[in-house]
Amino acid sequence: VQLVESGGGLVQPGGSVTLSCVASGFAFSRYAMNWFRQYPGKEREFVATIGEPDGYINYRPSVKGRFTISRDNTKNTAFLQMNNLRPEDTAVYYCNARGPDAPSSGYWGQGTQVTVSS
């Protein structure tokens, strides 16, 4: 099982970035895909989720209207489009997959750093 995030980097306040998470080793279309983020010295916090097969989507309130989660089951890839970024969005972003064969905490990627700064 592997989840590989990409797309992070340095972006100016108000800018945009799209994170990608390419999955392998499990039945991607049967899993809910989630994004979490972690600040230094803090626990990971939920950012967004997209479920299957109902396509349920939910966001943490502070990113609603600015972030968009999506998935492409033909490419085993999940995305997090992040618009109107703020300095407080600076964090390591992690991809997470939860489903029938995963442990209770799901499968995790290695994380990608997003830094919002001028």
Image (cartoon, grey):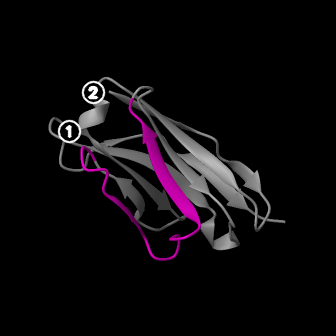
Is residue 59 left or right of 20 when viewed as pictured?
left
Residue displayed at 63% across by 72% down: 88
Mark 1: few/some/many CA within 10 Å (<14, 14-19, 20+): few
| Residue 115, above or below 73 | below
Residue 19, quarter of picture: top right
Say which label, 1 or 2, has the lower sequence index.
Answer: 2
Q: Which residues are magenta?
A: 52-73
Seen as rendered, the residue at the extreme left is 100
Q: For the residue marked with disc 1, what is the amino acid?
A: Ala
Is residue 117 left or right of 113 when viewed as pictured?
right
Quadrant the N terminus occupies: top left
- x and y, in percent, of residue 58 in the image: 37, 64
Secondary structure at numbered mark 1: loop
| Residue 95, above or below 85 | above
Residue displayed at 52% across by 57% down: 68
How far apart marks 1 and 2 lie (CA) works out to 9 Å
Mark 2: few/some/many CA within 10 Å (<14, 14-19, 20+): some
* Contact between labelled residues 2 and 1, with CB atoms less than 8 Å apart: yes
Seen as rendered, the residue at the extreme right is 118
- x and y, in percent, of residue 46 in the image: 39, 63
Q: For the residue marked with disc 2, what is the amino acid?
A: Phe
- x and y, in percent, of residue 33 in the image: 35, 46
Residue ID for mark 2: 26
Viewer-proximal residue among 78 and 72: 72
Residue ID for mark 1: 102
Residue displayed at 16% across by 35% down: 101
- Taking the magenta stretch, the answer to whether it contains residue 68 is yes
- Taking the magenta stretch, the answer to whether it contains residue 21 is no
Residue displayed at 20% across by 38% down: 102
